[in-house]
Amino acid sequence: MRDSAYRQVPFALSEIDHAYGDRTHVLADPLGLSLLARLGHPETHQPDINRLLDRCYTILFAAMVNDLFPRKQVEAATRMCEAIPGASYQGEAIDPATKVVFIGLARAGTLPAYQGFALLNDLCDASGLRVDHVYMQRRTDEQGRVVGVDQTGSKIGGDVDGAVVVLPDPMGATGSSMSDAIDVVKNIEGTPKAIVGLHLIITPEFVARVCGDHPDAHIYALRLDRGLSSEDVLAARPGERDGEVGVNEIHYIVPGAGGLGEVINNSFV
C-alpha cells in the first residue's frame, strides 16, 4: 500500500535565527523551553530533575535524528495484514543500520548518553550502538575561575568509522570541555559520519570556542543564554554584535540552570 505522501518525508528544524553558522542549531521549541525552565528552577529537586532531563533530551535527540540521520525506503507489515493482505507502511524511515556512538562525559553527560542509547535501541540495530566514556573535570584557580580541563581517563569500545558520534553535555558554558572531548573523538580510529554536540543550554562563548576549534562539528541546543550582555546586544540578532556574554566570572551560565552535574547526581562537590 504505497502512498506517495510518504515517499519523501519533508522535515525542517524549527530554530531561532542567528549568525553563528549553519552547523549550530538553537531550537525554537516552546515545549522544550518550558520543560527546561522547570528543570533549572531553584525549587526543582530530585527525582524531578532526572525525569525533566530525560524529557528535554528526548526533544534534542528527535531534532538530531530527524535532521541528520540517513533514511531509507521500508515496507513494514502492520497487524492488519491478517485481515487485509498487503497491509503495510511503505515509505521513508530512519535507516536502522545507522551506527551511533554516544560519548558519556562525566559527570553531567553520563545520564543523557544512556538516555540516548536507550532511545535509539528502539530505532537502530543494537549491534551498531554503544556508549563510550570520557572523564574530565574543570580546573579552577583560587578565585573559582576555570583555567583548564583535566582529562583523567576514558573507556573507548572500538572505532568510530562511519558512525554518528553524539556528545550530550547539558551545559555548554566556555566550550573548553567539549572541544577537548571532540579532540578525543578525532583520535579514535576511523572517520565519523558526523560529530554532534547536544546541549540544553549554550552560550556565545561556547559556540565561538567549539566552532573555532572544530568547524566540522554540529551543535544542537534547546536554549542560547547570553544574559550578561548589554541591552543593545540582547536586542540584536544572536551572533551579529560583539560583546555577547553568557558566563560569569567563574564560568557559570547566566541565566543558566546552575551546576547540573551536581543536581543530576545529587552530589554537591
Image: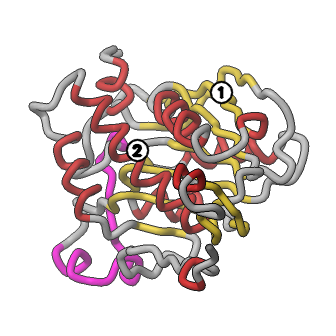
Question: Which secondary structure is most common in the magenta stretch?
Answer: loop
| Furthest residue in direction left, as rendered | 43
Q: Can residue 173 be seen here?
A: no
Residue 241 magenta-drawn?
A: yes
- The local secondary structure at tag 2 comes to strand
The picture places residue 40, in percent across and down from the top left corner, at 21, 41
**Residue at 48% across / 78% down in the picture?**
12
Which quadrant is the N terminus positioned in?
Answer: bottom right
The picture places residue 162, in percent across and down from the top left corner, at 83, 53
Q: Which mark is residue 148?
A: none
On the picture, is 187 further left or further right than 195?
right
- Residue 18 lies in quadrant: bottom left
Q: Amino acid at mark 2?
A: Met
Which quadrant is the C terminus positioned in?
Answer: top left
Classify mark 2: residues with Cα within 10 Å, few (<14), some (14-19) or many (20+): many
Eyeballing the image, is 269 above or below 240?
A: above
Which of the colour schemes (rainbow, by chain, secondary structure, one colour) is used? secondary structure
Q: Amino acid at mark 1?
A: His
On the picture, is 84 further left or further right than 159?
left
The residue under label 1 is: 133
**Residue at 58% across / 51% down in the picture?**
82
The residue under label 2 is: 171
**Residue at 69% across / 62% down in the picture?**
75
| Furthest residue in direction right, as rendered | 189
- The local secondary structure at tag 1 comes to strand
Magenta span: 231-251
